[in-house]
Image (cartoon, helix red, strand yellow):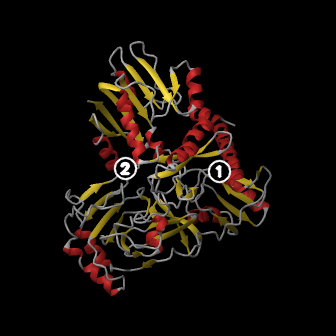
Amino acid sequence: MDDNQVKNKRKCIGKQKKAFHRLAKDMNITCCDEPTQNLVICNGGLVTGLKREVLIEILEKITNKFIIIMPPGKSYSFVKFENEQTASNVYNNIHGKNNDFHNGILYLAFAKSIPELENETESLDPPPGLRLILDFVTPDEESKILDTLNWNNDEYSGHLKHRKVQHFGYEFCYDTNRVDVDKPIAPIPEELNFISGVFIKKHCGDLVYDQLTINHYEPGQGIPPHIDTHSVFEDPILSLSLGATYVMDFRKDNKKVSLALPARSLLIMSGESRYAWTHGISPRHNDVINDDDDGLTTKERGTRISLTFRKVRRGNCQCNYPQYCDSKNYVNEEIDNSVAPGLENSYVHKVYDEIAEHFSETRHQKWPNVASFLENIQPGGIVLDVGCGNGKYLIEKPEIFMIGCDRSSGLLDICKKRSREVLLSNCLQLLFKSNSLDAAICIAVIHHLSTPDRRRNAFIEILRVLRPGGKCLIYVWAKEQRRDSKDSTYLRFNSKKTNDNHSTDVKKIFDNLTLNIHENRTNFRHSDVLVPWKRKGGGEYLRYYHVFEESEFIKLCQNLPNSKVEKIFYDQGNWCTILEKI
């Protein structure tokens, strides 16, 4: 056996071992060395782009009696043969060898059993209110529409991370899923007005649409799952597909429906499908579709153009889906000063004492802007870190004196073990004289205060202890975790890629207060939330947060006594400010 053969054999064994672990974990499938009538295609499945018809061609060179099972969302597939001898013959002819049909080498393994998935498709009925009209426009009308579009016109066109886009009537902002009704732009082109007549002819409702978004998708591009904001747009929303067929995914809670949108078809989203189900297109180069004859297979994507027609709403939404609606308060989130101390004690102070060790293990990296602020403190300066946590910012710098305070005795114990100068203190009552400090930082603290008054008082208390001319840097969590079409680090670390418009659990705090439980690594839908912390070794704790909207934060900073705003900025999902005491 030459060196190449040895390398190939090792590679085959490596591929098989990886598949063994994956199959055991995913489907409780046991692979074996002895021949069985079941084969696993270790590196060929719907996710890898292996087409059912290609696999059929490969197998039919050897036998025509087999059953192919291609599980959705998996990188492997299964084949069941009449007997062990046929399976062995296929294994010997295909495993680790080049073939004429597939770009690459297929690696096979024997399995003791295979899942009963042959007829498994996403067979859920379409979401209520969803309607797809095939051949909505003629091929000539499709060509007419495509000829009308000018992707070189900067006035109407833009480039997003995942596709090109044009807006008419009003610009649709993908950061917020809204439009600014006070800033109309060029209206829908007259050349497209004939489509409104087709809407009427084919009974698509009687709305006069005044907003149009046109998306240009190339293979590999998509759009994240979302629900068009209730208060901004009427019902229904219409989407006309031109060019290539793409699959759109609809989700609600744990339900998922995938729907192929052929060229010249019109999708009507009304009722529950418009208000309660997210819709999105995964960024990939092929789609899994259901072939009526052969079951699930893959289809390569081409260029798709979609025209989404919306009617801008004037006034609040009156839908029956309050848990997804921005016009309605799904839960009672009104927090007053009578319940605030109890809420913060139970869902902030006690929690941090419980999770102090684990929390500290996850807090090592310093924010660059915070480190830069501290580097600019003049020699001899006295600096306070309000809510110092594990003391990571209490730097050992001989020319300045740093002291930290925190409400958590557990975190302070960690600071003391590191020989940091710290004391127990609440940010609303700092144990320092007025006008006594040169600078202060307060990083990720004030968003744990549960009323506007308490948050404002924390700002004022920090300013109180500063001398005139002293400066403070304050960070709070932002409600806007996606800005300028870019996700914050918080969202980018979402390994599950959970959609943003999921329904949330709620927790009753007191008789008159219920709060939403936020799903980690997703966009915030509510300002006052409980955020889960999963402690290493088990146990989940809920921490209270108030996430700040941009306008709210700016207004707060600009209306504080005895201070001036030096800077307000956004830093990776946080609103930040540098204030100077005057």
Check residue 107 in the rendering and tell me which mark sits there, or answer none.
1
Kindly identify the residue that appears in the image at 49 percent across and 60 percent down: 332
Q: In terms of depth relative to the viewer, which is nearer, 348 or 207?
A: 348
Badge 1: how crowded within 10 Å, few (<14), some, or many (20+)? many
- Left or right relative to 349: residue 460: left
Work out which residue is located at the far top of the displayed protein and give it: 398
Question: 363 above or below 122?
Answer: above
Residue 391 screen position, x and y as percent: 51, 26
Gap in angstroms between the C-alphas marked 2 and 1: 52 Å
Position above or below: 336 against 259: above
Q: Residue placed at 19% from the left, 58% from the top?
A: 155
> Which quadrant: the N terminus?
top right
Query: Which quadrant does the C terminus fall into?
Result: top left
Residue type highlighted by circle 1: Tyr
Q: Is residue 144 left or right of residue 462?
A: left
Q: Is residue 243 visible?
A: yes
User: In what element is the residue under mark 1?
Assistant: loop
- The residue most toward the right is 34
Q: Which x, y percent locates residue 95?
A: 66, 51
- Mark 2 highlights which residue? 549
Instruction: Tell me which amino acid carries mark 2.
Output: Glu
